[in-house]
Image (cartoon, rainbow, N blue to C red):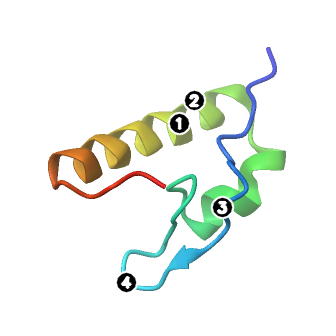
Amino acid sequence: MSIPSPCINVCRMDAERHLCEGCLRTIPEITGWSRADDAERLRILAAVAERRAARASAGEGAQ
């Protein structure tokens, strides 16, 4: 199975949260994506989903 990257080409790091403003991944998650197996990619995607939900519940707008 090939799991696509969540990158949406909005590549700016939030200095306070240490997350990409576009895909909500950390730098280690971004740099490790190409070497990650499917299980690790799914773990990253689950973390991204949690971050999106937290951002939505905090009333922050999506990029």
- Residue carrying label 3: 10
Q: Nearer the viewer, mark 1 or mark 4?
A: 4
> Which residue type carries mark 2?
Leu
Residues packed near mark 2 inside 10 Å, few (<14), some (14 to 19) or many (20 plus): few
Q: What residue is shown with label 2?
A: 42
Of badges 2 and 4, nearer the viewer stands: 4
The residues bearing labels 2 and 3 have C-alpha atoms spaced at a distance of 21 Å
Q: Are marks 1 and 4 in contact (CB under 8 Å)?
A: no
Circles 3, 4 touching at the beta carbon (< 8 Å)? no
| Callout 4 amino acid | Glu
Examine the image and state in which quarter residue 10 appears: bottom right
Which residue is tagged 4? 16
Of the two numbered discs 1 and 3 on the same chain, state the one appearing first in sequence: 3
User: Which is more N-terminal, label 3 or label 2?
Assistant: 3
Residue in the image at 70% along x and 27% along y: 38
For the residue labelled by badge 3, is the local secondary structure a helix, a strand or a loop?
A: loop
Name the residue carrying label 1: 45
Local secondary structure at mark 2: helix
Mark 2 touching mark 3, by CB under 8 A? no
* Cβ atoms at labels 2 and 1 below 8 Å apart: yes
